[in-house]
Image (cartoon, rainbow, N blue to C red):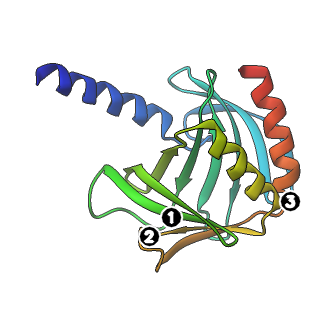
Amino acid sequence: MKLKGQIIASILFACSTLMAPATADAEVVRLFSHKAWTVSYVTFASGRTACTAGTRNGNGDFFDIRVYPGGGLATFIELNNWTSDIGDRDVNMVLDVDYHRWTLLDTSLMGNSFMFWFPNESGTGQFNRQLANGNAIALKTWNGKHTMATWSLAGSSAAILAFRECIARII
C-alpha cells in the first residue's frame, strides 16, 4: 500500500509539471502561426519539452494538442473563468469536433485545467485529421448536454502540418 501511495504521488507530481499552458513558466519558441492557431516548441520549467499546437477563444480559454519526446498525444485545456468545485481528480469529458464526438475517459482535472492522454496512436491520427478539417471544437460535460467552451479551428489545417514537422524533430 505504501508503494502504491508513492507511485500515485510521483504521477501527481509529473502531471503537475506537464499540466501547464505553454506560456506559464516555460520557454516558448513560436514555429508557426496562422489565423487562430499557433505551433510552438516549448521547454517547461521542469526541463521537459514538447511540440504544441493551440488556440485561444474570445474568453481567453486555451486549447492545445501536444506531443512530448517519446511520443504520445495529449490535449490540454485551460478555462479562464471556470474553476472546479470538485477538487483535483480524474473526470470524464466530451470533445466535439464539429459533429464527431470524442469521449475522454479519466481526464486529469487540476483547478481550471484538463489534460487527456490519447490511449493509442490510431485514434490520434483520426483526431488530428478532424481538427485539421473541422470548423469548431467544443468541450462538453460528460453527458454532452452542457458546453463549457468552444474554439475556432480556423488555421488548424496548416497548424497541424507544422505540428507534424515539429514532432518529426523531437521523436
Residue beneath the point at 71% across and 50% down:
126
The reply to whether callout 3 and callout 2 are in contact (CB within 8 Å) is no
The quarter of the picture where residue 134 lies is bottom right
The single residue placed furthest to the left in the displayed view is 1
Residue 138 lies in quadrant: bottom right
Residue that badge 1 annotates: 94
| Labels 1, 3: front one | 1
Question: Of marks 1 and 3, which one's residue comes earlier in the chain?
Answer: 3
Mark linked to residue 141:
2
Residue type, mark 1 in image: Val
104 sits left or right of 28 in the view? left
Q: Which residue is mark 3?
A: 35
Crowd tier of the residue under label 2, counting other residues whose Cα lies within 10 Å: few below 14, some 14–19, many 20 or above: some
The three-letter code of the residue at mark 2 reads Thr
Q: Work out how far the residue at label 1 is from the one at label 2, CA to CA, in angstroms.
A: 6 Å
Where 137 falls versus 171 (above or below)? below
Along the line of sight, which residue is nearer the eye, 24 or 111?
A: 111
